[in-house]
Image (cartoon, coloured by chain):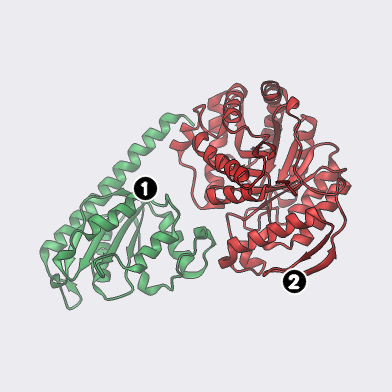
Amino acid sequence: MENKNFLPTFDPSKGMEFGIYTLGDHLADPHTKKRISAKQRLDEIVEMAKLAEQAGLDVITVGESHQDYFVTQAHSVLLAAIAQATEKIKISSGATIISTSDPVRVFEDFATIDLLSGGRMEVVAGRASRVGLFELLGYDLQDYEELFEEKFELLLQINQKEYVTWKGKFRAPLNEAHIIPRPLKGHLPIWRAVGGSLESAARAGRLGVPMYQAHLGGPAVVFKRAIDIYREYAQASGFDAKTLPVATAGFFYAADTTQQALAEYYPHINEGMKKTNGQGFPKQSFAHSQDKTSIINVGTADQIIEKLLYQHEMFGQQRYIAQLDFGGVPFNKIMKNIDIIGNKILPAIKKYTAK
Amino acid sequence: MKIVLLSGSNVGSKTRIAMDQVKQTLTEKNPEHEVSLLDLKEYKMEFSDGRNYLDYKGDTGYVVTQLMAADVIIIGSPIFQASIPASLKNIFDLLPQNALLNKTVSMVITAGSPKHFLIAEQQLKPILGYMKANVVQNYVFIEEIDFFQGKIINDDVLFRIEKLVEDTIILAATYQQILAEHEDQYGF
């Protein structure tokens, strides 16, 4: 079956793509107990994107959040600022909560950023793990799944066709509506964000859309199941699973020694998770993450390279996206991480994954 | 330690009477701890709809936040229809999957019939285990006949409550200490 979705293209000869993502959390640095201002945090995210570009990373991703301890309520505005500040790095949302947004406006915004950035925009649409935004924006949590499916499919339709006729439950109908501006190549790459739900992975496969999978912790093999299901359902729905890209994303922190990486990063994860998710990250689980088979990419450059190659062999993903600023990581450490990625990790990953 | 006593019923008075007794014993014997009693009858609780516990507001948000912040939880529960009451099950449903990790949890059960003795063993303990609680294996089982005019009149029950309180504190304090020593060994 012909896939009507517009798929991002990857050049296998260049190896796996490497990016960074931020959810725009705005938390105190647990080592100093100090929290920077919202302005400084936003400025530093733009700065982080510039550094990522200079270090040769492929993509910078920013997620939408509407709760306490975040600054990315208007993530598309921040992405536009990043587009202006950079020249070649791909720009992605991750995730845009399409359930509580109007797909027409989402497409208008991102198509505009795509034009301004010279065709660098991608969209990752998700369902939200925290749900305060439903009440904030006037939606009913009871419609959590239905809202996402309806609006996500409308977004895909708008992406496929310039004139859209559509009728649904949660938005006024569209009658040959002309949805402009069109992105530089006419379409945007649109991914489906998948958390822990296998059913969501199956739906991504059925729709033939690229899958963006976020991980917290645990052995890498646990996450392979969702990727396998995604590809099985894509194949069974008539798509060629080999053409469908997969991206994986999760916690990342590099330092000169393993011990330093663990000691520096653990308080950020533990305190950050407490504030944003209500439960800390068990120290025991974090200690276990030193093993090669763990999905958490924390340690020295060599350890992380080994882990990423292990994960790549298992997942066969086209893109890996590191979350290295979570929980109030100070900017000098963010700089140091990007430096280690650019100088050591990226060249090795590209070399060993290029086909 | 932060100790929360949870009276898990919206119906009747015996579970609350038993939990008041637990509270009195605790505050007399262990005044150094922070003890609070949450009686679900006094709160307007919403049914769980699957959201993160931080996203509940009002009484529901207050109760789940208190429980999540506790080091020790002592659950008081009646037995209805050969099971725990819906009000208590709702609390478990409101909390996240591993909500009781590193928390010590013990149980005080009130029932109208001795036939209900194994209900806590077979229905409540598996839930606590699934939610990763450090469970005090023995529980206090109090029958209707042990109460009279708003008081526990069976001295044996009072001794058993005293023992349960001691066992709970011993297990919690020991576990916290060993866990802290173990975590120090990680070196981060």
Left or right: A156 with respect to A303? Answer: right
Which residue is outermost to the bottom?
B149
Give the residue at x 49% y 60%.
B50
Tell me where residue B157 sits by quadrant.
Answer: bottom left
Disc 1 marks which amino acid?
Answer: Lys
Q: Which chain is green?
A: B
Say which of A243 and A249 sits in front. A243
Q: Nearer the viewer, residue B17 or A167?
A: A167
Q: Are marks 1 and 2 on the same chain?
A: no
Quadrant where the image shows the C terminus of chain A? top right
User: Of the residues tagged 1 and 2, which is closer to the observer?
Assistant: 2
Q: Colour of chain A?
A: red
For disc 1, the chain is B
Residue A327 visible in the current orientation: no
Q: Is residue B82 above or below residue A23?
A: below
Task: Give the image quarter of residue B125.
Answer: bottom left
Task: Kindly state the secondary structure of the residue where label 1 is placed.
Answer: loop
Q: Amino acid at mark 2?
A: Ala
Query: SS class of the residue under badge 2?
Result: loop
Q: Position of residue A24 (x, y in %)?
A: 68, 48
Q: In this rendering, would B112 be left or right of A180? A: left
- State which quadrant residue B37 falls in: bottom left
Q: Using the image, tell me which numbered label, if any, was put on residue A172.
A: 2
Which residue lies under the disc numbered 1?
Answer: B132
Residue at image x 21%, y 56%? B139
Q: Is A336 rendered above or below residue B35? A: above
Q: Chain of mark 2?
A: A
> How far across and down, in percent of the image, does residue A350 sit?
71, 24
CA neighbours of label 1 inside 10 A, class few (<14), some (14 to 19), many (20+): some
